[in-house]
Image (cartoon, rainbow, N blue to C red):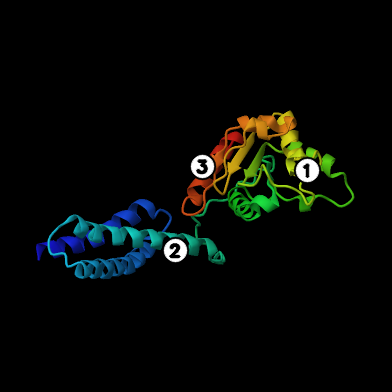
């Protein structure tokens, strides 16, 4: 009897501890609602495995069946909450004059941030990073897409001028960033007309802070992999931007670093 009570306590204690440590950003109500199915699923799984293997005393297997299910289901629940929170539409602001706890975007027009990325390599994650930075700084100070280049202008001159106006250049590097090729099979980085190469070269020659953002488990490119004009990129200190559930924490770290770089 005491063993059964102890096992039930474990099944409840493990998800509570798990959600307390890793459930930052979720309300108490969300955590409470999530713990209930986690507890029920853990009990059914633990009881079923114990019955199938006919365990009647605290053995190694008995301990495993008591601890592993709540860990597993807690992890699944946190992943679900993360995905759900990132996909939900933003709530419309109430017309009532209620004090907001949300952080007001920094509207420093001089805090220009240039996001350099390659669509075929990291378009989706670049969009997500851009959205988070807009929440923090507002839309005006951030230049992201080459679609903003006016028709009929020399894109080399335009990009060079835009990079020259920025205070920080963010280079989003995915796992194909170094090796990706054009339609003719030539590596894009080796083309002097390549947008990404032009942007990085322009920032490096002006000694503008260049921060590599490593996404999709990418590794930092080494000097030998880069054209001579942008070899300096290999020595710039960067940061990993991992997928959920680490994305929000990594973006908080990036925003804090940018605040310092931008004099905030």
Q: Is residue 232 in sight in this rendering? A: yes
Please indicate, yes or no, whether residue 141 appears anywhere in the rendered image: no
Label 2, label 3: how many angstroms apart (C-alpha)? Answer: 23 Å
Q: Residues within 10 Å of mark 2 (few under 14, many from 20)?
A: few
Horizontal and vertical percent position of residue 137:
61, 47
x, y (%) of residue 218?
57, 44
- 10 in relation to 254, above or below: below
Q: Are marks 1 and 3 in contact (CB under 8 Å)?
A: no
Q: Which residue is mark 3?
A: 253
Mark 2 vs mark 1: which is more N-terminal? 2
Q: Quadrant of the C terminus?
A: top right
Q: Which residue is mark 1?
A: 194
Q: Is residue 256 left or right of residue 10?
A: right
- Circle 3 Cα neighbour tier, 10 Å, few/some/many (<14 / 14–19 / ≥20): few
Dot placed on the residue nearer the N-terminal end, 1 or 3: 1
Q: Is residue 180 above or below residue 222?
A: below
Q: Which residue is mark 2?
A: 80
């Amino acid at each position: 009897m005491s063993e059964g009570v102890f096992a039930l306590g474990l099944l409840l204690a493990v998800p509570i501890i798990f959600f307390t440590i890793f459930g930052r950003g979720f309300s108490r109500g969300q955590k409470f609602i999530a713990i209930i199915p986690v507890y029920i699923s853990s009990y059914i799984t633990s009881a079923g495995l114990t019955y199938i293997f006919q365990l009647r005393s605290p053995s190694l297997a008995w301990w495993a069946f008591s601890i592993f299910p709540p860990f597993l289901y807690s992890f699944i629940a946190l992943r679900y909450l993360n995905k759900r929170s990132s996909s939900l539409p933003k709530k419309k602001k109430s017309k009532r004059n209620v004090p907001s706890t949300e952080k007001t975007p920094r509207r420093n027009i001089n805090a220009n941030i240039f996001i350099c990325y390659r669509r075929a390599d990291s378009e989706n994650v670049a969009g997500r990073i851009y959205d988070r930075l807009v929440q923090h700084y507002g839309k005006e100070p951030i230049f992201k897409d080459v679609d903003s280049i006016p028709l009929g202008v020399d894109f080399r001159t335009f990009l060079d001028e835009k990079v020259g106006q920025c205070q920080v250049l963010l280079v989003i590097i995915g796992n194909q960033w170094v090796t990706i090729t054009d339609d003719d099979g030539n590596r894009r980085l080796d083309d002097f007309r390549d947008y990404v190469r032009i942007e990085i070269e322009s920032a490096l020659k002006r000694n503008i802070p260049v921060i590599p953002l490593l996404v999709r488990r990418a590794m930092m490119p080494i000097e030998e992999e880069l054209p001579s004009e942008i070899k300096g990129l290999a020595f710039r200190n960067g940061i990993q931007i991992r997928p959920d559930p680490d994305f929000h924490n990594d973006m908080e770290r990036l925003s804090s670093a940018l605040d310092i770089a931008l004099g905030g």
